[in-house]
Amino acid sequence: MALVDRIRDVRSLDFSRVRPWRVGSELVGWISHEFAHRLAGYPELFAMTEDEVRLAAGLDDFEKRSLAVDGAIRALVADGAIRRYRGEAYAVGRAFHEPPLLAIDRGAATRFGIRSYGVHCNGYVGSREDMKIWVARRAADKATWPGKLDQIAAGGQPIGLGLFENLVKECGEEAGIPAYLAELARPAGYVSFLTETVEGIDNGMIFAYDLALPEDFMPVAADGEVDWFELWPVARVIDQLARSDDFVFDSALIVIDFLMRHGFIGPDDPDYVEIGRGLRR
Amino acid sequence: MALIDRVRLFCPPDFSRLRPFRIDGKTLGWIRHPFAEALRNYSGTFAVADHEVSLHGDLTICEARTRAVAEVCKDLAAIGMIRKLRGETFPVACSALSLPLLALDRGAVPHFGTRAYSVHLNGYVGRGDALKLWVGRRARDKSVAPGKLDNLVAGGRPSGFGLLDTLIKEGQEEADMPESLVRKARPAGFCSYLIETEEGIRNDLLFNFDLDLPAGFVPRNTDGEIDEFQCWPIAKVVDRLARSDDFKFNVALVNIDFLVRHGYLAPDDPDYVEIVRGLRR
């Protein structure tokens, strides 16, 4: 078992199992054939062929599209075709900085395979061989990835909130990190993937932030989403990553990116280039 | 002019202009058609087909391949098909750590489009907004990129050298750094690209290292390859990168990777995702 296994766990999407979802000419997501069959029940919204799902052309602005698709999503939740309604809107569009074409509920994001965005915070103490990383275990009753290991704070990116604003908010809610500390976090790139998990088509881009915390800082599970926090020596983090899939798959990518940027993995590792390439897909 | 302009240079080549160069059935490089046709005259060394070039089947060991290909390169340099042989070879191998399958003169590398590995050292002082980065100016008589700005230390990995060996050797020659100081450098990831230039195909993988230098350290060039070193505030580096192509084209990439990893660029920049994605191709 090795770190590269966490990269290989994130298998590339099998495109024979999905069809593209387009709004106008823009590709905005990937939909499984099974879910496409469910959407065929809404012909006034989705124009369906074997090769693609296209949003009805008559829906010609953000409000109309969002409202119409939300109606279908609520019905699909009631039918059990979507597991749950989260009450948090995600932007749907071509790229992060372009105006969104519509918004859909977070609970439907992996059904429509939209590119979803998130922010994750690497909270650490010390430097080099003495560095320790804060690790969180997700609560056993979390809707997604219960009991798995995670960053000290992480969250999905809802529409209408800035990335850094969201990071500071998640740091406060999930770990009790006061804003004056969270605001010291520095952006450090992103990881991205397009894969199929138990949740559906996970088409994610996660912006990584590094936060050097004071030695005496203790995180607090403020919103009940975390069972415990522990401060692990880097060697233990590496060992756990290499030997198990205990970390959520995307959080594992964020930690590995951190390890690479901070020199804890080097080009003497035969998997170095494969690992580096596997972080952004 | 903006940072993204430095990254957009690295667009992939038009593969219809190229054919793969194979050794033992593996694609290890890319050759332009006119150069491939010139290799037809050397049927004892190369098997040239319309869709690929491979080494002659009798050349099974590295030493024999190296000798045979060197003879051909000498001929092609004499008739001007290769501009200049450098008298130094780069290993051709499946990865940076694999055993070499062939050693190829550095001047011939772009003609065969084989992957070249290099090491780049970001030498810096201080942190945060007060961080300063050492910048070198290449000598005006360098055959490649004369007068352009460079990293503190950078160099291609020649045959027979490991990556760290190369960094130590270049650190001594280019900046008069003691080995003990170079050894403190931390690996920090890599940049990569495959592009067509005037000379041929550049298929490069650049291993990046960071070194937090003592404030009293002053580099001194010993091999005549660098005219002068200056220690620049990070804001000046960003500004010069954005407004000019004064940095050697691939050094700009290494510097931008440094800016991303150390939080000097933030994802609110509308070009952020394209910049980060463009660092590894």
Image (cartoon, coloured by chain):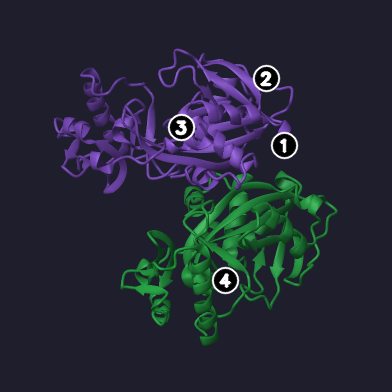
Question: Which residue is under mark 3?
Answer: B157
- In the rendered structure, which amino acid carries the disc numbered 1? Gly
Query: Chain A's colour?
Result: green
Where residue A253 appears, as percent x and y from the top left, is 57, 57
Q: Are marks 2 and 3 on the same chain?
A: yes
Q: Quadrant of residue B173?
A: top right
- In the rendered structure, which amino acid carries the disc numbered 4? Asp
Marks 1 and 3 in Cβ contact (< 8 Å)? no
Of residues A71 and B151, the one nearer the viewer is: A71
Chain of the residue displaying label 4: A
Question: Which residue is under mark 2?
Answer: B218
Q: Secondary structure at mark 4?
A: strand
Question: Which residue is under mark 1?
Answer: B128
Q: Identify the residue shown where x is 42% and y is 44%.
A: B95
Marks 4 and 2 in Cβ contact (< 8 Å)? no
Name above or below for residue B114 compared with residue A240. above
- In the rendered structure, which amino acid carries the disc numbered 2? Val
Q: Secondary structure at mark 3?
A: loop
